[in-house]
Image: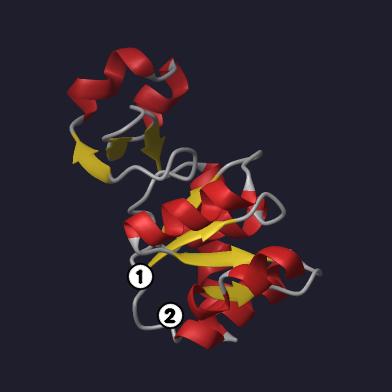
Amino acid sequence: MKFIADCHLGKVAKYLRIFGFDTLYFQSIDDNDIINIANQEDRIVLTSDKELYSRIKHKALYIIHGEFEEQLRAIFKHFDLYKQINPFSICIECNGKLEKVSKNEVIDSVDLKTQIFHDNFDRCTKCGRIYWEGDHFKSMKSFVDVFLEK
């Protein structure tokens, strides 16, 4: 399942990516462009804009303003996403796919502390960003685990 989120749902888009869902997000984009991308790429529009929603109801979910976790839970419930997750498989910055890479491939791109304490790395196939299981990862993993338990 692929999504495109409007400019009001940046945090939701980031967390959908953390859960492994292909989610486009642009800080600034015209409604017509969202609709065109959704139609061309067979994406579901996630929006908190009533006007945009009214134009594409058949391929959209209206998200009520509020806490991002509540918004995320509404999306998961509506599309029954709980069994479709593949956490930490998509770049949270650009929506590219992550691939496992050897430490040798990225050693010159990470700081010394990371080189010493970490051995497992992923790299985005689109933007080249490098990921490892540091404190930030542990925080996101904890969120994922708690979210799925509720």
Q: Please, is residue 124 above or below residue 16 in the view? A: above
Verify CB contact (< 8 Å) between mark 1 and mark 2: yes
> Where in the figure is residue 42, as x and y percent of width and height?
35, 64
Which quadrant of the view contains residue 12? Answer: bottom right
Q: Residues within 10 Å of mark 1 (few under 14, many from 20)?
A: few
Q: Residue at x 65, y 40 (%)?
A: 27
**Residue 1 marker:** 1
> Where in the figure is residue 32, as x and y percent of width and height?
57, 51
Secondary structure at badge 1 equals loop
In this rendering, would 34 be left or right of 120? right
Residue at the farthest right position: 66
Q: Residues within 10 Å of mark 2 (few under 14, many from 20)?
A: some
In this rendering, would 137 be left or right of 69? left
User: Mark 1 or mark 2: which is in front?
Assistant: 1
Q: Which one is in front, 120 or 66?
A: 66
**Residue 40 marker:** none
Q: Please, is residue 54 above or below residue 139 in the view? A: below
**Residue 105 is at least partly visible in this image:** yes
Q: Which one is in front, 27 or 17?
A: 27
Give the residue at mark 2.
Answer: 81
**Residue 23 is at least partly visible in this image:** no
Q: Is the C terminus in the top left, top right, bottom left or bottom right quadrant?
A: bottom right
